[in-house]
Amino acid sequence: MLDVGGGSGVWAVPLASEGCAVTVVDPSPNALATLQRRAVDAGVADRITPLQGDTDALAALAPEGGADLVLAHGVLEVVDDVEAAVAALAAATAPGGVLSVLVANRYAAVIGRALAGRVSDALQLIQDADGRLDPASDTLQRRFDAEGLERVLTAGGFTVERIQGQAVLSDLVPGSVLDNNPRAADAMAELERVAAVRPPLRDIATRLHAVARA
């Protein structure tokens, strides 16, 4: 499998522990150093290959059609050219292979800014074509909604099998509601599971998770 932007190995180390051979491509040498330490500690360093680079250089780092599973979590919202990035991900994915994409959700950002009293920012996020605030201060190049995410992946040659939400309501529930209350925590987990696949609740999740096939 190939983890693009996999950084410190949040996904790579657990997957390697399950027996996967994982190549991690990330531009940050510090993140890759952390990945290597975690891989050694977990006893899976022989199953993980860390490579420094970004999505633009993916063709030179990963063999064409070489990955049965490609992860691109937190990638598409920060690249300069999203279409080129999706094309690079498609080239790296084996025929019939799976792409997992996790992106920031525009509408969650709108709700978050509005609840914080930043109404002008909320308005800009909903009106801007890319769901972006002032480029001088916004760390993201773009935010997605479910329709836009599906459109980008489909245009890149993928068949989108599922789009679901991640952190649909949990980020809106005060921690005091769940602290020291196992029943509330269990109910919250079940609520998240159900809401993740049910529009319009899915569409206000903090992040959108797409699973697509090449």
Image (cartoon, helix red, strand yellow):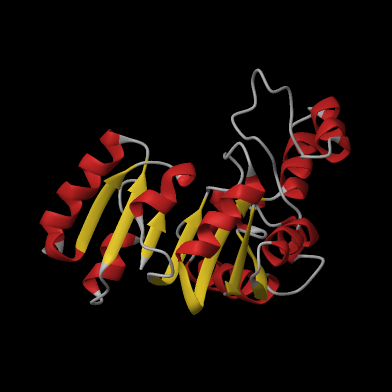
Specify whether 88 is left or right of 54. Answer: right
The residue lying furthest to the top in this view is 136
186, 59: nearer the viewer: 59
90, 134: nearer the viewer: 90
Q: Going 52% across and 68% down the picture, which residue do you hit?
A: 99
Q: Quadrant of the C terminus?
A: bottom right
The residue lying furthest to the bottom in this view is 96
Position of 180 relative to 126 (above/below): below
Q: Going 15% across and 47% down the picture, which residue do you hit?
A: 37
Specify whether 8 is left or right of 38. Answer: right
Specify whether 104 is left or right of 18. Answer: right
Q: Inspect this view and state whether residue 6 appears.
A: no
Q: Going 70% across and 44% down the picture, which residue do you hit?
A: 143
Q: Position of residue 158 (x, y in %)?
A: 64, 71
Position of 83 relative to 68 (above/below): above
Q: Position of residue 208 (x, y in %)?
A: 64, 59
Q: Position of residue 210 (x, y in %)?
A: 62, 66
Based on the displayed image, in which of its 4 quarters is residue 211 positioned?
A: bottom right
Q: Quadrant of the N terminus?
A: bottom left
Q: How many marks?
A: 0
124, 87: nearer the viewer: 87
Q: Inspect this view and state whether residue 17 appears.
A: yes
Q: Position of residue 44 (x, y in %)?
A: 15, 64
27, 187: nearer the viewer: 27
Specify whether 70 is left or right of 135. Answer: left
Q: Going 60% across and 58% down the picture, which residue do you hit?
A: 167
